[in-house]
Amino acid sequence: MTPLSTYSADHRFLVESAARATDLTDPVAFVAGGYAHNLVVNATRGPLVPIDGALVRQWVTRSKYYPGTAFGIRLYSLEGIRFARCVANVDTDYEESAYDLFVVSRADYLKLFRRVLRLSRQKVENGPPPVLPDSQLEVLRQNTLGYLDRNNLKRIKELGGRPKRGLLLTGPPGNGKTSACRWLWEECQRHGYEYQLVSPDAYQAARRSCNPVQAVRELFTVHRCGVIFFDDMDVALRDRNTVRETDDQAVFLSALDGIQVNEGVVYVFTTNCSLDLIDPAFKRPGRIDLVLHFTLPDAPLRRRLMDRWHADLRAGIDLDTAVKQTAGYSFAEVEELKNLLILRYIDTNGWDWDWAMEQFRENRTDLAEQHRHVGFAPVGAGSNGSSNGNGDGH
């Protein structure tokens, strides 16, 4: 743990640095928690400012949520309110939230919170549900959004039901687990539910912190009614090729059992591995209440997916042939065929289904026949010890 005297001195220094950079009066430091995403993505992004003359930029471009610095201060404004995000966690033994914090003037603190609260409650556009069998989609809906419905949750609690629900989405890659989670995430925003997105990297970072049990528990905590997503949980918890017990499992199960919420929480876990490789203690009711298997789509489901394609593309190919020839393909593979069709159209101004199928087969064959190393290997090494020098990290 960070020594109190060290933390206090660091805290004062960081808050004062952020206040000077943003010209804040009587600064207040806060951690935004589940509101951080709405706070940052809706704000106008200002410049980066050094901390005590030091600034380390970070090349992260996939989302404006990230401040773009590993050590420094990012300035923001939201509806005329100026605030700053200060990032200065230089020691993995220190509590992360103590060195990654927001600062705002005291006079604007409640105003900023109310604006973010309003933004978080705004309804987002209702997107189409994932392409799943109707019965499976309804079960998914009932056990997540339906469970969190205020009236349903109140009745569940009155009758002595558990204030949490756990779902495990399983099946080979590319068959709809990610699409289902993305839809649920959008629905959480639309209904105003809180959500947490836990990745294997975030989990492992919490495990390496100075207080791993508390850090993991925070990952799986919502402060109001919401959903927690843990994608590829088997990657974080264990080697997929073993069934041995791990310390990670003990910390994870302890964190789940220790969670307390006011309204209710739904955990949605995804995995590509066999259920036989998952600890029975994790699969027991109360942790996992429902398992949904995502398998290869049948012809009607593949047709439903293709019916969502652009009208020009659908008019340019024989959809009946496309559905028939993609028997045994996953959703991801069908979508890759769509991408190949679009790339071909850009080059030739024509839709060529046969070319897309042939190109897809060639690509799949190349991937199956190439014995490439994950990471880097010596140039020119043989197939039994390395690769052709290409560092393909898949």
Image: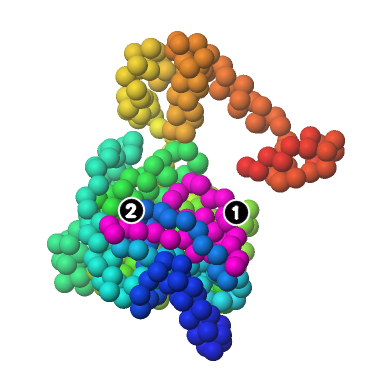
Residue plotted at (24% across, 42% down): 126
How many C-alpha atoms fall within 10 Å of the one at disc 1: few (<14), some, or many (≥20)? some
Q: Find the distance from the CA under tag 1 to the CA under tag 2.
A: 39 Å
Residue type, label 1: Arg
Q: Secondary structure at mark 2?
A: loop
Instruction: Give coordinates of residue 178: x percent, y percent.
Output: 42, 45
Residue type, label 2: Asn
Is the N terminus in the top left, top right, bottom left or bottom right quadrant?
bottom right
Residue 379 lies left or right of residue 346; in this view the side is right
Instruction: Give coordinates of residue 149: x percent, y percent.
Output: 19, 58
Of the image marks 1 and 2, the number of the one nearer the N terminus: 2
Instruction: Give coordinates of residue 219: x percent, y percent.
Output: 44, 66
In this view of the protein, can residue 264 be seen by the observer?
Answer: no
Which residue is denoted by mark 2 in the rendering?
A: 42
Foreground of the two, 322 or 91: 91
Residue 175 lies left or right of residue 382; in this view the side is left
Q: How is the image coloured?
A: rainbow
Q: Which residues are magenta?
A: 53-80
Q: Secondary structure at mark 1?
A: loop
Nearer to us of marks 1 and 2 is: 2
Residue plotted at (34% across, 23% down): 310
Q: Quadrant of residue 277?
A: bottom right
Which residue is denoted by mark 1 in the rendering?
A: 240
Is the C terminus in the top left, top right, bottom left or bottom right quadrant?
top right
Foreground of the two, 18 or 112: 18
Residue 377 lies, with reference to residue 13, above or below; the image says: above
Foreground of the two, 13 or 294: 13
Q: Which mark is residue 343?
A: none
How many C-alpha atoms fall within 10 Å of the one at disc 2: few (<14), some, or many (≥20)? some
